[in-house]
Every structure is written in C-alpha cells, then in structure tokens.
Amino acid sequence: ARDTGQQITPIPRITRDVWFTERDENIALSLKHTGDQLYKKQSPYQKVEVFETLAYGNMLTLDGMVMCTQKDEYVYHEMITHVPMLSHGNVKRALVIGGGDGGTVRELLRHEQIEEVVLVEIDELVIEACKLHLPETASAFDHPKLKLLVEDGIKYIQECANESFDLIIVDSADPVGPGEGLFTAEFYGQVYRCLTANGIMITQSESPRFNTKVFVEIYDTYKGIFGQEKVHCYLAAIPTYPTGTWSFSFSSKGNVHPKDVNMDVAAAFSREHNLRYYNEDIHQAAFALPNFVKDLLKK
Ligand code: SAM
C-alpha cells in the first residue's frame, strides 16, 4: 500500500469476552477470565474449577461458587486466623475443618508458639487444584507442624477427644453440598467439646446482607452452645464474595474476649509478617457492627 505518512492505529490485542458468573436468584457476581480454564474436575463431592481472571488472578470455584482468588484471599485468611490467635495469645494446637486451599494454615503457621495444626479437608481435588494453580495460597502443605488429613470433618470431630484444641476454625464453604453438615447445632456442640477450657471457635459466618437467614440462624445456634455473651461477630471487606461484606464468628469457651487483644503485640506481628489486611486497628474495628447487623443479631 502507498505510504500516506499517516500513523496507523494499532489493532488492540484481542481478549475474548468470557465471564464467570456466580448466580443467585436475584444477584450475580461476574469476573472476566481468559477463557482457558486451568482446572476442571468433578470430585465425589463437588465440581472443582480454577479460572484465570483478569482482575483477581487465578480463582478457585466449587460448584460454581467463588472460594478464593489470588489477589484478595489474604483478607479472608488473615482475618480468620490472626484475630483469634492474637486474642488468645497462647494457642498451641489448632484444628482447621475445610480450608483445603491452604490459606488458613499458611497464616496459622506464621505464629511461632503453635505446636501443631491439623487440617481436615474432605476433598483432595481442592488441595490438588490449589497446589497447581494457587501456589501462594497452598504454600504451607509441607510444613513440619502441619498434619493434613483428607477426610470428613464431621466424622473427625465426632471421634476427637475432649479438650484437644485451643482453636478450632471452621473454614467451610456455604451450607450446601458436603459443607451442609458443618452448619448444624450437633456439629458445633462437638466443636465445643473438643475445645480446651479457654478455647476459641471461629467460623466464616456468611454475608449478613446476602445470606441473612443463615446468618441469623447460625448466631442463634452458637449462642445456644457457648452462651449469649461469649459469641462475637466481626466483619471484613472481601470483594469477590457476594456483596463484599463478609462476617466471621468468634465464640469463646472460657473468658477470652477479642477486644482485650494486646495492641502492641498485634501491631508488631502485623509489621513483622508484612500482613496486607490485619493490623491492631483492624482487629478492634472489625467488631464495630453497623446497626442493621446489630439488629439481625438481636433477633
Ligand atoms: N474461603 C472459602 C469461602 O468462605 O468461600 C471457604 C474455603 S473452601 C476451601 C471450603 C472447603 O471445605 C472446601 O474445600 C470443601 O471441600 C471443604 N469441606 C466441605 N465439607 C467438608 C467436610 N464435611 N469436611 C471437611 N471439609 C469439608
């Protein structure tokens, strides 16, 4: 072609317009991805997939629901672990039920005083998918203090001896599929039994906006088991979970109160480990609840 001297506008790199959408009846969350699905297998329990999203990096989904993404998983994992660890101050043995992506145990094992962490995940494909495609999340599976068991957490807790753990974290997905039994009063009663006298139970307790009914019900159940004053709710901002407002429950068998945290120790820990969400101010502030959440918890 004749050179007219005009600058030719470069043709943009073609990115396919493919979106992952997590759908509920009235609301959906979509993330654009590359279209080359990194992992897709059906386990006996659920469909395990990994997508490469443009905004949040690699993302694990189970049965079409977002579990974690490379770029925001730190919020969930720092908040589910460091709040109880620093409130208690002397956790030696911790149990994680679910959590096969590895993020929760990675954070627990930052605490030097911990002697043993037991992780009970029902689905080995979750572990495989994360080791392959979310390696920063699944980075602690070879840690010498970790005991990894691929089995049903409900069965494990039924057979667990009284007062075995200072901290039990229920890092479950939503109350559907294999995780359903992790949301029952019977299960939480067993968790209570397996906690030491000053032990703490932490659960992810869904979104107070999105899963309002489940949210109200599970707090009722926890209060029935631990006592009205021993159960606290705290919040974190997690962009890839429905509504972005996510809650965690803190239930104390003894007298550990989350607001009595040693602020200097929490600040030093956050700095030492270059944490990206948790710090001493967040620890306190996370327990400040908006009125609509307080009202739900009064019901
Ligand atoms: N961070 C995620 C969230 O809130 O969306 C949850 C983590 S996801 C890794 C939850 C894990 O719990 C899944 O890997 C699932 O296989 C596991 N799980 C479900 N039911 C279980 C059970 N009965 N025993 C042990 N693990 C279970």
Image (tube, rainbow, N blue to C red):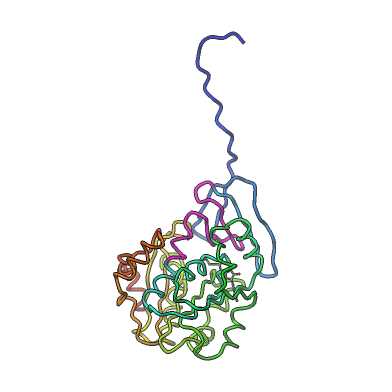
**Rendered residue at 60%/88% (across/down):** 159
Please state which of residues 210 and 228 is positioned toward the viewer in this rendering.
228
**Quarter in which the N terminus is drawn:** top right
**Rendered residue at 53%/69% (across/down):** 174
Q: Which residues are magenta?
A: 54-78
Please state which of residues 160 and 214 is positioned toward the viewer in this rendering.
160
Total numbered circles: 0
Classify residue 284 by image quadrant: bottom left
**Quarter in which the C terminus is drawn:** bottom left
Q: Residue 87 at x, y = what percent?
A: 36, 76
Classify residue 153 by image quadrant: bottom right
Q: Residue 162 at x, y = what percent?
A: 52, 91
Judged from the image, the quadrant occupied by ligand 1 is bottom right
Vertical placement of residue 174 versus 59, above or below: below
Classify residue 293 by image quadrant: bottom left
Residue occupying the far bottom of the picture: 162
Q: Please check the rendered image and state whether residue 60 is part of the magenta-colored stretch, yes or no.
A: yes
Q: Residue 58 at x, y = what percent?
A: 56, 53
Q: Please check the rendered image and state whether residue 1 is part of the magenta-colored stretch, yes or no.
A: no
Q: Residue 265 at x, y = what percent?
A: 33, 71
